[in-house]
Image (tube, rainbow, N blue to C red):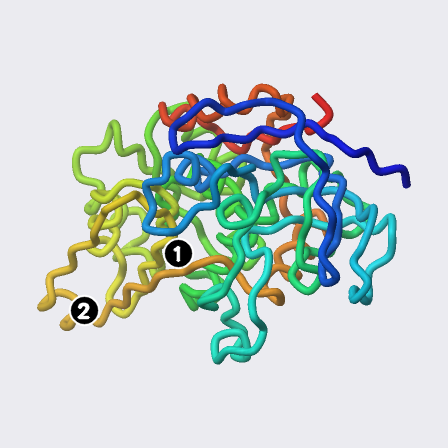
Amino acid sequence: MSIPQTQKAVIFETHGGPLQYTDIPVPVPKPNELLINVKYSGVCHTDLHAWKGDWPLDVKLPLVGGHEGAGVVVAKGENVQGWEIGDYAGVKWLNGSCLNCEYCQNTNESNCADADLSGYTHDGSFQQYATADAVHAARIPKNVDLAEAAPILCAGITVYKALKTAELSAGQWVAISGAAGGLGSLAIQYAKAMGYRVVAIDGGADKGEFVKSLGAEAFVDFLATKDIVAEVKKVTNGGAHGVVNVSVSEKAMDQSCEYVRPTGTVVLVGLPAGSKVTVPVFDAVTRSIKVKGSYVGNRADSAEAIDFFARGLIKCPIKVVGLSELSNIYDLMQQGKILGRYVVDTSK
């Protein structure tokens, strides 16, 4: 395949600075890397944090953001095995890790101290050509729509991992807080595919209709409900067995520790900057509840999440716009006006 010398990308040089849609050089893959012609990239709330610089993580500057890039392998480093030119591949949040530490050896490579993060410490998928470590790059079946596959590479994998972390059994209730957003809309579908009953929590009648169309059995509108905790307990007949918090509301996370059923598990996924979760010790002990953090999935989680999608069990509610419109999407995210997931077409 003919690879150009330059490409279109969105890059920023300072936190909160202009998002520049411009021409930059096409990167050259290292011996262990793939060069992926990114066709589509999902837009994640994490991308907003990278731009703002409000997380306690080092950020490469200047930076090309993005970590949900779906595309085609067009070149590979000399040490790469198991990949062919023309394969479909994905750029994930976890671009690479050392593979040798205790975390990598125990399937927790996302906790590796030397993890390389797409769109954070490694130029990501808001460009037409991106590099990815061949070991960690996602394998995407060729029978899928790449635009719809893009959000699976972070949002899908992340919520699938969170649902596994909740350790639920088929038929049990899972509450999803922030259910109408990019992560929540996928979490509902994965939960249904895994056999769970879903109570979706979000604000607004339009969001209620949306989450029910995705398979939520019940909807709790935090804008219209006076007592969220009591309502969730009523709907689930005693409280949710598990909770997946993908919202960025500190209050919502605190409430989830109240409406989770005794012996249940609260899973924290959303990362509002500087927030804390408060759980009364007496309540946590006497009700035997668990509060767990869930980061991105490992390689096996990624393959499983993509397989659910490839088999048609997960539908990504996406809106495709041009890469040149990325700044407008950031504005919508900051205003809380996102339904489903935005995906950028890198050719526009």
Which residue is located at x 50 percent, y 50 percent? 121
Query: In the picture, residue 128 is in which quadrant?
Result: top right
Which residue is located at x 21 percent, y 46 percent? 229
Coordinates of residue 164 in the picture (x, y in percent): 48, 64
Above/below status of 71 relative to 104: above
Which residue is located at x 63 percent, y 29 percent? 9
Coordinates of residue 39 in the picture (x, y in percent): 73, 35
User: Amino acid type of disc 1?
Assistant: Trp
Q: Which residue is mark 1?
A: 173
- Mark linked to residue 287: 2
46 or 342: which is nearer to us? 46
**SS under mark 2:** helix
Coordinates of residue 7 in the picture (x, y in percent): 72, 30
Q: Residues within 10 Å of mark 1 (few under 14, many from 20)?
A: many
Left or right, 320 with respect to 210, comes to right
From the image, state whether disc 2 or disc 1 is nearer to you.
2
257 or 262: which is nearer to us? 257
Query: In the picture, residue 5 is in which quadrant?
Result: top right
Q: Quadrant of the C terminus?
A: top right
Left or right, 73 with respect to 255, comes to right
